[in-house]
Image (tube, coloured by chain):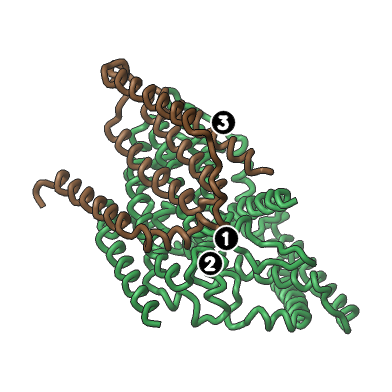
């Protein structure tokens, strides 16, 4: 009985905070709203029984990646004024057009295929052990490839950052 | 009904933390004083009763509540107000997954003594504690002060660095217990002292402990508020209850950290070498022993206090403090002995009473371990000097991270062999 309330509540929160994130002028305020948005997303995952993904969402995105974002924004000390001139430029126009195209695409897709319900998953599908088992059996190769990609990114950033090792 | 119980549990845990915080502040001041060879707080008194300086904490609370709340000009107001709230909120909700005792069996219902037994257990702890950095960072930035900004940046770098070792240190425990649930980890350790993770995973323990000190921003890693360089770091501009929230968050972090150490490495609520079944079979005996023990403790403690009564030591109401506390202690002790003599011939626990008694005992043992580690935090703070910033980073990335990885490797190999 409470699940739908939580689901729609957090879903609405995610939408509202995402909108706030896009519309804020101050970059730090934007980043903070994005953190709240990630939090709402994690809550959505948890109402969908995907505990592992939900917790990882908070741990990695809200707790680590956004911290670094805010860290960089603070270090560069970008004020609201410096960003204002660039908001109505070509890139913004292009981004808006792409977004509208995406929305139209999704709406058309939904209209073409009638909405059907998926079969309910088994209890505890999104818990840690089942997800881990899937990662290390069925999806082992993509998982390892992702880690190689991350390694490349780390090595690349070290090389870029430190010319003289 | 379930939601009501959950809300009740949440409220009671919050109350426990709130009420331990002033005691910890008292313990910190007294501990600091005795480590530095002085007497510590002992002046504040209500009608001459000082309780060894505890009344000072009460004074602090009143002072912080009634102080003027200053919001400086040119601060980012919403974030300035939000930051202390985040700090305290994050520090307290971590306790939601800590098991305080065995579940209580009341008839057909099973009452868990933790708010939520999440499957992701410890990951939840890490996830929530990783949000703690926002309180410090946003406070540092919103205050529009260069000292506080530097403090916020330092703390962000420090907490992100040490989170890595913190997380990797406990992977060995997951491998051995085969679960992330804190209840499973406690059950895996059992009541045999030689099977506790402190002896099975000593390297993990030391890495975890060190990283935890960095996460709580306590000395030797309190660079975010290093007084000699940054005045007070990220909370320079804060006053009144906003400052108090940061202050309380720090102590709440200590409590939470101690709870996690106890759960992961020191067998949670298990009493060393005394299995739960043994207590369950002899519950009446244990209860009687505790009763008599408490009575004797009360009489002896009261007697000791009464003996310290000396008229004319201060020449005012403070003279009578040992009497005021000691005499009731003796009386209560004798009353307990008398009650024991009358009622304790032949009685048995009701089934639910027995369960509640055992759970209380376990929660008491858990709290005792937690308080020891709280004291340990204070002990370290007043013993070790502060690290330099480059030393801090070197320790985190070049020493603890490789050690944690090696620990995982060795543990994995051992688990595979057995």
**Residue position for label 3:** B68
Labels 3, 2: front one: 2
Q: Quadrant of residue B310?
A: bottom right
Q: Name which residue lies at 42% across and 70% down.
A: B175
Please tell me the colour of chain B: green
Q: Are marks 1 and 2 in contact (CB under 8 Å)?
A: yes
Give the SS element for disc 3: loop
Q: Mark 3 belongs to which subunit?
A: B
Is there a contact, CB below 8 Å, between mark 1 and mark 3?
A: no
Q: Name the disc covering residue B98, or none.
A: 1
**Residue B88 in sight here:** no
Which disc is residue B263 wearing?
2
Say which mark, if any, is on residue B308. Answer: none
Task: Name the quadrant of the N terminus of chain A.
Answer: top right
Q: Secondary structure at mark 1?
A: loop
Of labels 1 and 3, the one closer to you: 1
Chain in brown (letter): A
Residue at 46% x, 50% y: name it.
A53
- Taking the image as shown, residue B320 lies to the left or right of residue B370, namely right
- Please state the horizontal and vertical placement of residue B253, each as a whole percent of the image: 50, 53
Same chain under badges 3 and 2? The reply is: yes
Mark pair 3, 2: CA separation: 41 Å
Q: Residue at x 39, y 77 (%)?
A: B415
């Amino acid at each position: 009985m409470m699940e739908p309330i939580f689901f729609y509540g957090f879903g609405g929160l995610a939408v509202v905070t995402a909108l706030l994130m896009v519309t804020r002028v101050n970059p730090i305020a934007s980043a903070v709203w994005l953190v709240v948005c990630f939090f709402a997303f994690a809550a959505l995952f948890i109402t969908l029984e995907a505990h592992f993904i939900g917790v990882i969402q908070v741990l990695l995105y809200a707790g680590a990646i956004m911290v670094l974002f805010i860290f960089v924004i603070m270090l560069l000390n970008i004020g609201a004024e410096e960003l204002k001139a660039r908001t109505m430029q070509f890139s913004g126009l292009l981004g808006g057009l792409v977004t509208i195209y995406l929305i139209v695409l999704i709406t058309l897709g939904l209209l073409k295929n009638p909405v059907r319900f998926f079969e309910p998953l088994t209890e505890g599908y999104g818990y840690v052990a089942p997800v881990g088992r899937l990662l290390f059996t069925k999806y082992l190769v993509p998982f390892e490839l992702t880690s190689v990609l991350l390694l490349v990114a780390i090595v690349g950033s070290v090389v870029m950052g430190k010319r003289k090792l | 009904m379930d939601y009501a119980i959950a809300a009740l549990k949440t409220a009671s845990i919050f109350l426990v933390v709130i009420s331990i915080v002033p005691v910890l502040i008292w313990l910190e001041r007294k501990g600091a004083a005795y480590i530095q060879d002085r007497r510590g707080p002992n002046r504040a008194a209500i009608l001459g009763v000082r309780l060894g300086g505890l009344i000072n904490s009460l004074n602090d609370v009143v002072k912080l509540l009634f102080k003027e709340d200053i919001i400086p000009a040119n601060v980012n107001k919403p974030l300035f107000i939000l930051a202390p709230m985040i700090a305290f909120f994050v520090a307290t909700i971590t306790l939601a997954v800590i098991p305080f005792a065995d579940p209580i069996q009341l008839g057909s219902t099973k009452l868990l003594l933790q708010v939520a037994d999440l499957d992701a257990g410890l990951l939840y702890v890490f996830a929530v504690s990783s949000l703690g950095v926002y309180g410090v960072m946003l406070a540092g930035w919103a205050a529009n002060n260069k000292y506080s900004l530097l403090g916020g940046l330092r703390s962000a770098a420090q907490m992100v660095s040490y989170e890595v070792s913190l997380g990797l240190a406990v992977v060995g425990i997951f491998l051995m217990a085969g679960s992330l649930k804190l209840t499973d980890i406690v059950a895996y350790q059992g009541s045999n002292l030689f099977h506790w993770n402190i002896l099975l995973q000593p390297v993990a323990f030391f890495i975890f402990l060190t990283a935890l000190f960095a996460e709580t921003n306590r000395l030797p890693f309190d660079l975010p508020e290093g007084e000699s360089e940054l005045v007070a770091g990220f909370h320079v501009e804060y006053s009144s209850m906003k400052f108090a929230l940061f202050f309380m968050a720090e102590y709440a972090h200590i409590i939470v950290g101690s709870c996690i150490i106890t759960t992961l490495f020191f067998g949670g609520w298990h009493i060393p070498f005394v299995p739960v079944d043994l207590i369950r079979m002899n519950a009446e005996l244990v209860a009687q022993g505790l009763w008599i023990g408490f009575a004797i403790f009360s009489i002896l403690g009261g007697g000791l206090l009464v003996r310290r009564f000396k008229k004319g030591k201060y020449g005012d109401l403070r003279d009578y403090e040992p009497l005021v506390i000691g005499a009731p202690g003796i009386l209560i002790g004798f009353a307990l002995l008398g009650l024991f003599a009358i009622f304790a011939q032949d009685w048995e626990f009701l089934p639910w009473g027995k369960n509640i008694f055992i759970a209380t005992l376990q929660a008491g043992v858990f709290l005792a371990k937690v308080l020891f580690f709280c004291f340990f935090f204070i002990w370290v703070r007043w013993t070790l000097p502060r690290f330099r910033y480059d030393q801090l980073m070197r320790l985190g990335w070049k020493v603890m991270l490789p050690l944690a990885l090696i620990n995982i490797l060795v543990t994995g190999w051992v688990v595979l062999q057995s």
